Image (spheres, helix red, strand yellow):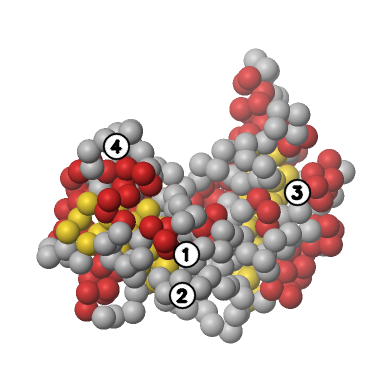
Amino acid sequence: MKIVSTFVLTAEQRKLITEAAPQAELVDPTQVAGRKAKHALFDPDVMEPHLADCDVMAAYTIPRDLVARAPRLKWLHCMAAGLDYVLRTGMLDDARIVLTNTSGAQAVMIGEYILMAMLAWAHKYHSSIRAQSRHQWLGLGYFFANADTLRGKTAGIIGYGPIGREAARLAHAFGMEVLALKRDPATHADPRFGLPGVGDPEGRIPRRWFGPGQRTELIALSDFIVITLPLTAETRNFVGARELAAAKPTACLVNVGRGEVVDQDALVAALAQKRLAGAALDVMVPEPLPPGHPLWNMDNVILTPHSSGPNIRYQEDCCRIFAENLRRFQSGRELLNIVDVRRGY
């Protein structure tokens, strides 16, 4: 079996993979003469000699002609959770290639980001940061009038996958009530990869469960509207003007899924008109936002540059999932995190 990693592996990452598949040939860009950059995520021309007889591939970016370049490829593991950037090309629609992602590897980091965003909003930390940039000392009266605690508040989590479940675990620890929305609300457990002690794999935390058609009801009950959905045909503009109109005027929306899941024009209007109190956005449309976009200058908006997931252990955590799946692949067991190409996740 030949495994191609299209990104440079550290010694520890290579060890994880070779221990899982000791008989396999493992190639990454460091072993290819003429590679253009030390940390290139994918250079199809450099990796070309190794694609023709490749059985398994781990990659970030994927060339549109991958199926033609790698005719023997049986399994493609993408080093990301949201794969809309791959699926929208249609290149895997009719290919007999198993596709897996790294859902679960980002749960801790993004779960903490969600809690951070909720805490920042509740404690008005973002206001202090803005005041610091103006060399302004906010009086205590501002905090007496505006700051609050998370305890007793409701987090409505739209997309109860690994990230949503870790956010729920943390929110619950802070005394929050959790509502959960997923495609099939009758199925509470999640079979995907999960780190030990992370998330809510059995689905025991939410007080109530909602299906996609009940999202307006969930939003109306939520103090924090947390969106972790992937982008698919069904989730594009999943939260629009009608849904935002149901929100409490004191609510804050936190989006770590994809910008296109929310109707951004409707969101801007709701924020500008104070029909929604605030938003913390790690994803938006487009990325990066153009300099004149109104979201930049809204005092009730926290913006981060799609940075809730990346961290110094990201690639190693993703390789752990890949290594576990390698063991399963060799023994004929079902892989973790198989992506339904038609459904989009």
Residue 82 rendering spot, x and y as whole percentages: 52, 58
Q: Amino acid at mark 2?
A: Asp
Which residue is the site of mark 3? 264
First-in-chain label (1 vs 2): 1
Which residue is the site of mark 2? 190
**Label 1 packing within 10 angstroms: few (<14), some (14-19), many (20+):** many
Residue 154 rendering spot, x and y as whole percentages: 65, 61
Q: Amino acid at mark 3?
A: Gln
Q: Amino acid at mark 1?
A: Pro
Which of the two marks, 1 or 3, is nearer to us in this view? Answer: 3
Q: What is the spatial separation of the Cα atoms under label 2 and label 3, in whole angstroms?
A: 30 Å
The reply to whether the C-beta atoms of the residues labelled 1 and 2 are less than 8 Å apart is yes
Q: Nearer the viewer, residue 61 or 266?
A: 61
Which of the two marks, 3 or 4, is nearer to us in this view? Answer: 4
Q: What is the spatial separation of the Cα atoms under label 4 and label 2, in whole angstroms?
A: 40 Å
* 197 to the left or right of 225: left
Q: What is the spatial separation of the Cα atoms under label 3 and label 4, in whole angstroms?
A: 40 Å
* 105 to the left or right of 114: left
Q: Quadrant of the N terminus?
A: bottom left
Which residue is the site of mark 4? 35
Please tell me whether residue 263 is drawn above or below residue 290 in the rendered image: below
**Residue beneath the point at 47% across and 64% down:** 162
Which of the two marks, 4 or 1, is nearer to us in this view? Answer: 4
At mark 1, the secondary structure is helix
Residue 27 rendering spot, x and y as whole percentages: 22, 51
Please tell me whether residue 134 is drawn above or below residue 327 in the rendered image: above
Which residue is the site of mark 1? 162
Q: What is the spatial separation of the Cα atoms under label 1 and label 2, in whole angstroms?
A: 8 Å
